[in-house]
Amino acid sequence: MNAGDLAIRASGLSKRFGDLLAVDGVDLSVPKAHVYGFLGPNGSGKSTTIRMLCGLLTPSAGTIEVLGLRVPEQAEALRLRIGYMTQKFSLFDDLGVRENLEFLAAVQGLAKAETRRRVDELVEQYDFADRQKQLAGTLSGGQKQRLALAGAVIHKPELLFLDEPTSAVDPESRRDFWEKLFDLADAGTTLLVSTHYMDEAERCHRIAILDRGRLVADGTPAELTGALAGRSVVVHSPQPRRAQQALVAVPGVLSVAQIGNALRVLCDGNHDAAERLRAALRAAGIEARAETGEPNLEDVFVAATGRHDAADAERAA
């Protein structure tokens, strides 16, 4: 991919806090007008990486180029071209919806006439037409996230950073929020989104998985799951708990998770994985049926990080 097609290019990016190496030699290439997802467990370095890319933190090593600007050297020029939204509601509870947007427009240096047009546009686009005077502190969680997103794009940024933006909202609000994100991407905005939800990661055009400060996977969801073909096995047994206990002891088994009455097993190789599990279950005297399944992003996470409990990702911050 040509450099002109990239919104972000980072090489050897590292950040040390005393003895702690929070980010370790990360290389990133984020295409323009893409939704690029960051997935990783708590403490993996996602937020630290985002803050370095924004120019809020100075790297200990490595180079960063964002929208053709060197960071942190040209961070001030970059600030006018990017938006940044965190998981915490960052607007003013005691100001109304419209007042919050007008204040943020002033911070970004929009002229009064432009502010009026832009706020009118966002109020309509983000479904606040009948709530313009409502205090932000009285909004629901989903409404607050929509307002925060509207505030982050008040100046029409070319690149939007979102750090765990939907961690405190219900599933329906999360779906609506993601529809807004794809509207932005369709209009040409590049989005870098950190998330701890697998279903959100699956929505991204590309995904990077960070673990212990290192980049351990990078690609489209289809590429990442396709690389695990033959390694995911679904096991059906009338005794799923006994079957699980037998399978966790099988060499080459990375994880065994019960999903309803079935077991989802991830193996370290695709050499007759299903048959190996069938043999282990027969040897343990357990009645079961094992079939090769379609890998998913939870399998990718486990394979990339070596963490047997993929729920770690769901708890990541």
Image (cartoon, helix red, strand yellow):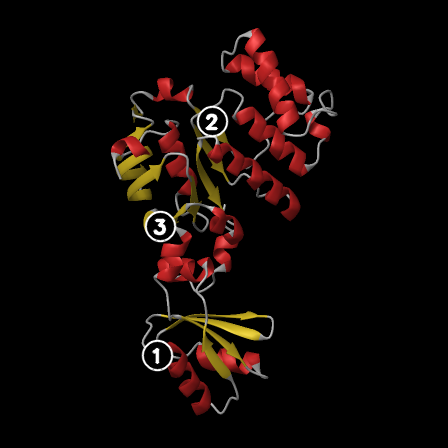
Amino acid bearing label 3 = Gly
Q: Which residue is mark 3?
A: 219
Q: Position of residue 297 (x, y in %)?
A: 45, 57
Image quarter of the N terminus: top left
Numbered disc in front, either 2 or 1: 1
Q: Position of residue 213 (x, y in %)?
A: 34, 46
Figure label count: 3
Q: Secondary structure at mark 3?
A: strand
Q: Secondary structure at mark 2?
A: strand
Q: Nearer the viewer, residue 112 or 18?
A: 112
Mark nearer the N terminus (2 vs 1): 2
Which residue is depicted at the point 31% across and 39% down? Answer: 29
The image's mark for residue 83 is 2
Q: Which residue is mark 1?
A: 272
Amino acid bearing label 1 = Asp
Mark nearer the N terminus (3 vs 1): 3
User: Is there a contact, CB below 8 Å, between mark 2 and mark 1?
Assistant: no
Which residue is depicted at the point 39% across and 83% down? Answer: 275
Q: Position of residue 153 (x, y in %)?
A: 52, 25
User: Is there a contact, CB below 8 Å, between mark 2 and mark 3?
Assistant: no
Q: Position of residue 252 (x, y in %)?
A: 35, 74
